[in-house]
Image (cartoon, helix red, strand yellow):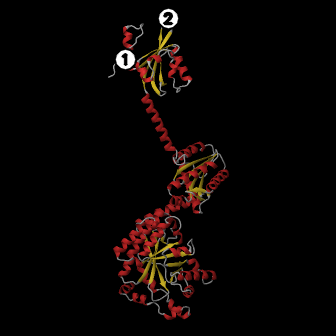
């Protein structure tokens, strides 16, 4: 323990005062000044904390310790107190000899002479520097936490939490005044492609550019927020709907301007959905829902546009929600099933194929086709779940048909992008193939042209190659109605094209549709691919397509889709197209092979299981 320094006690102090001074010197930082502030006494602790020697301090003014932390008013208030003979207590920041600062908890006691006048001040101090540093750290930490809680670190914009708080406060302010404000949600249209093509650092830099451009168009009536990912929030106050929409359009125009991404110049766009208070909602949740529905509508219309909320959008969303709930219940109740429609080969020596088509046996509405519950297919999770159901059921049904000796070429199943978003669908396909003994060569997968664009495009291509390499036939459905190019026919493993029913429906009377159908068949054949015409409903269509050398025909002329148990009845009821074509003299193939039903079907109809079921 450090020995106590020798005390220099003023001669006027009595022994009892000497003891008090000794006690103070042992525990505290002590100094005495006259009424002018001149230091007349310091103890060793004062010298230690200030860095000055006793000789440097005695005779100097206490202002030599001033740090600049406190303003003049602080010291005036202190002097007013002690000049009136009152004890002052507070915290003071002083400056050491080396320039560093320290904090002391200070009590100043005025000394009154025998004549009743104040002749000196004794200050008793305790070092609280460590505590003040800790307080500073806590304050900095609180400020940091406050910033983290309210500010997006990438763009330096207020974040979603602040966005929601501000909307809530605006709702409260405007609730009784009748004033309106506008809320907009903005979403960058091509952000995923930017991340995928250039990497996340480039994506972050692009978001900073978007934030900067939004700031540049905002006036004092509009606030910008980053809500997360590529989504931004805009709030426009104290203006009309026309002014708000004009400013929002200006914001989209700013984003459209070329920008440098990873050293290359790119043009990007954004979509924006607008909701108005109080017209579209009177609280935070309803306003955000309205703006989100408007944003979704803008994207569905082609993106790069501003759309204002309309009540019918909510009705559509509610209807979709109801359908999704009903589909989920239908899956739990096993209300979905597969029906099969024949795909008939024009050449009579080939086996028939089938297309598996989903049906929903709704408890109130009866048997529904996918067109009736199309809203459900807009949800990726529902699409994926229905795809898994279809996969399990089609393997079961094909296995049953094979056990009964039904001669089939392939069974076609329709796939969506959701079936390729992970490996689970394809992995399960091959698991079921191994479990059931039904090989990949028994199946055809039908895909649409739109699947080769947008999300999961690469996964779709990789998945099709994996299936094709295993022996699965790949058919391009609805050919000519979407976005496919001839490049897809060359680069992708496509074995067969399906002429869309829209070209078949009027081809008997429409030269244009005939030309399109003939052109598709000729292009496909020149590339070594087969062709199926769907939507065949009349003998005239059969004759025309046969003349064009179409390979396969599908449609109500041969039979509607039915349960697997009713397939034989459908096949028995098929019209004898070969005999009719021979009589009409429309196909040389028919004249060479005038038999109908073909040999494979005749053998099948003689199977014992069929006669037993008919009985």
For this rendering, which residue is in front, 419 or 241?
419
Q: Is residue 603 visible?
A: yes
Q: Secondary structure at mark 2?
A: loop
For this rendering, which residue is in front, 500 or 121?
121
Image vertical order of residue 57 relative to residue 145, above or below: above
Q: Is residue 477 visible?
A: no
User: How busy is the neighbourhood of tag 2: few (under 14 within 10 Å), some, or many (20 plus)?
Assistant: few
Residue at 55 percent of width and 74 percent of height: 487
For this rendering, which residue is in front, 206 or 568?
206
Image vertical order of residue 84 relative to residue 300, above or below: above
**Mark drawn on residue 5:** 1
Marks 1/2: CA–CA distance: 33 Å
| Quarter of the view holding residue 41 | top left
Please state the horizontal and vertical placement of residue 61, each as a whole percent of the image: 51, 17
Of marks 1 and 2, the one in the foreground: 1
For this rendering, which residue is in front, 299 or 140?
140
- Looking at the rendered image, the quarter that the C terminus falls into is bottom left
| Quarter of the view holding residue 544 | bottom right
Residue holding disc 2: 115
Q: Secondary structure at mark 1?
A: loop
Please state the horizontal and vertical placement of residue 156, each as a whole percent of the image: 54, 46
């Amino acid at each position: 323990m450090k020995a106590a320094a020798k005390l220099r006690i003023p001669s006027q102090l009595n022994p009892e005062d000497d003891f008090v001074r000794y006690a103070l010197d042992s525990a505290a930082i002590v100094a005495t000044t006259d009424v002018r502030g001149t230091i007349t006494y310091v103890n060793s602790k004062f010298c230690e904390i200030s860095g000055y020697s006793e000789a440097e301090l005695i005779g100097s003014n206490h202002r030599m310790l001033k740090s600049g932390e406190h303003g003049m008013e602080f010291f005036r208030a202190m002097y007013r107190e002690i000049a009136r003979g009152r004890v002052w207590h507070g915290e003071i920041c002083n400056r050491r000899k080396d320039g560093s600062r320290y904090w002391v908890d200070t009590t100043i006691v005025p000394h009154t002479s025998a004549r009743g006048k104040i002749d000196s001040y004794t200050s008793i101090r305790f070092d609280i520097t460590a505590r003040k540093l800790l307080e500073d750290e806590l304050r900095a930490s609180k400020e940091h936490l406050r910033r983290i809680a309210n500010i997006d670190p990438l763009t330096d914009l207020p974040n979603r939490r602040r966005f929601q708080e501000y909307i809530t406060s605006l709702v409260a302010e405007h609730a009784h005044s009748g004033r309106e404000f506008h809320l907009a949600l903005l979403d960058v249209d091509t952000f995923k492609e930017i991340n995928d093509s250039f990497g996340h650092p480039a994506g972050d830099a692009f978001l900073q550019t978007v934030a900067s451009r939004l700031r540049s168009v905002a006036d004092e009536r509009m606030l910008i927020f980053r809500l997360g990912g590529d989504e931004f929030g805009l709030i426009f106050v104290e203006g009309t709907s026309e002014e708000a929409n004009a400013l929002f359009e200006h914001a989209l125009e700013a984003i459209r301007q070329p920008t440098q991404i990873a050293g290359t110049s790119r043009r990007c766009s954004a979509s924006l959905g607008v909701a108005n208070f109080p017209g579209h909602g009177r609280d935070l949740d309803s306003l955000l829902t309205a703006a989100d529905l408007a944003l979704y509508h803008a994207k569905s219309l082609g993106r790069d546009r501003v759309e204002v909320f309309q009540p019918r959008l909510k009705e559509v969303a509610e209807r979709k929600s109801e359908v999704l709930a009903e589909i989920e219940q239908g899956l739990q109740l096993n209300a979905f099933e597969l029906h099969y429609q024949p795909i008939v080969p024009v050449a009579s020596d080939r086996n028939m194929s089938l297309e598996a088509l989903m049906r929903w046996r709704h408890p109130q509405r009866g048997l529904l086709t996918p067109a009736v519950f199309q809203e459900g297919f807009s949800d990726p999770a529902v699409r994926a779940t229905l795809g898994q159901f279809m996969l399990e059921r089609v393997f079961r049904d094909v296995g049953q048909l094979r056990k009964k000796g039904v001669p089939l070429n392939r069974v076609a199943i329709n796939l969506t992008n959701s079936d390729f978003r992970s490996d689970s669908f394809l992995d399960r396909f091959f698991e079921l193939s191994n479990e059931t003994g039904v090989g990949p060569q028994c199946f055809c997968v039908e895909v649409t042209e739109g699947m080769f664009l947008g999300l999961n495009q690469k996964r779709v291509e990789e998945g099709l190659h994996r299936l094709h390499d295993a022996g699965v036939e790949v058919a391009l459905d609805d050919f000519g109605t979407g976005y496919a190019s001839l490049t897809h026919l060359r680069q992708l493993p496509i074995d067969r094209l399906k002429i869309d029913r829209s070209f078949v429906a009027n081809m008997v009377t429409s030269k244009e549709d005939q030309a399109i159908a003939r052109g598709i068949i000729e292009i496909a054949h020149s590339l070594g691919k087969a062709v199926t015409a769907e939507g065949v409903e009349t003998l005239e269509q059969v004759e025309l397509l046969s003349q064009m050398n179409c390979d396969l025909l599908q449609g109500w002329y041969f039979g509607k889709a039915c349960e697997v148990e009713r397939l034989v009845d459908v096949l028995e009821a098929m019209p004898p197209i070969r005999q009719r074509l021979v009589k009409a003299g429309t196909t040389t193939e028919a004249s060479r092979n005038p038999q109908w039903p073909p040999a494979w079907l005749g053998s099948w109809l003689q199977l014992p299981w069929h006669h037993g079921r008919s009985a």
